Amino acid sequence: MSEGLFPRERAVVAPGAVHVPGWLSLARQRELVDACREWGRGPDSYRRTVLPGGGVMSVRSLCLGRRWEPYRYLDSVGVELPDWLAALGREAVVEAYGESGGLGGFSPDTALVNFYGAGARMGMHQDKEERSGAPVVSLSLGDSCVFRLGNAENRGRPYRDVELVSGDLFVFGGASRWVHHGVPAVRPGTADPALGLAGRLNITLRETGW
Ligand SMILES: O=C(O)CCC(=O)C(=O)O
Ligand SMILES: [Fe+2]
């Protein structure tokens, strides 16, 4: 992790979309990376999602808690969502919006863990299978990426590009809950070698409302 010339400041990127750089300590990041490895040992492991149109995503994903497939939540759980991760999600919402902004509590029942290996990206999409209007909490680990936060109407402009670095928290809720977003680029080799991860991991915690 190289230090940039300018400090990365906490930012409200759009109403309801909050970026908190460096939220997770290196020790916490390492614990999360270890947990992501452990989850991949099974019973489920990281897979490329096949889309209904036949396309195959370049990202490899694993669900914790309620299972997701494009484009719905199933009535089944593969790997349990650990309580400690749900609790971290609640802390994240308080960090982003303050004690009162959490609207009485965030109860995530699913997490999607995405692994971006060489060349992997994620196209512009909405997280819209959730019935709950609760925010989405995103934690980034490993290589930095460009996270594109768009608008609710379509996949195009206007959008804002945000650099997400290992340890960063990004929460999108409220007026930004249904905006299109994606990861057009990951910057290979930018992770802190001390993290022991080649590539990028992203964990999004969600409340499905199912
Ligand atoms: O990798 C990211 O930062 C975003 C992941 C995402 O949008 C998703 O899993 O739906
Ligand atoms: Fe998403």
Image: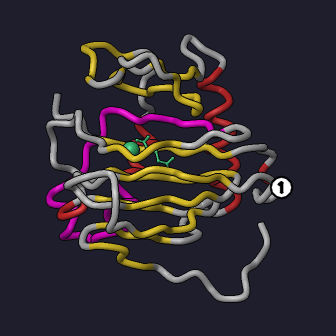
Which quarter of the figure has residue 164? Answer: bottom right
Q: Which amino acid does label 1 sit on?
A: Ala
Quarter of the image for the N terminus: give it.
Answer: bottom right
Task: Work out whether 192 lies above or below 129.
Answer: below
Quadrant of residue 8 within the rendered picture: bottom right
Apparent side of residue 21 relative to residue 137 in the rendered image (left or right): right
Q: Mark 1 points at which residue?
A: 194
**Residue pictured at 30% horizontal, 42% vertical:** 127
Please name the residue shown 52% across and 28% down the image.
57
Residue 155 locus on image (x, y percent): 32, 51
Left or right side of 35 for 102: left
Magenta residues, as a range?
Answer: 90-116
Residue 95 visible here: no
| Position of the C terminus by quadrant | top left
> Considering depth in this image, is 97 or 161 the residue closer to the camera?
161
Q: Can residue 186 be seen by looking at this rendering?
A: yes
Q: In terms of secondary structure, where does tag 1 sit? A: helix
Which of these two is toward me, 195 or 152?
152
Disc 1 CB within 8 Å of nearest ligand 1 atom: no
Q: Position of residue 84 (x, y in %)?
A: 46, 42
Spot the residue most to the bottom: 6
Image coords of residue 175 (percent x, y) = 18, 64
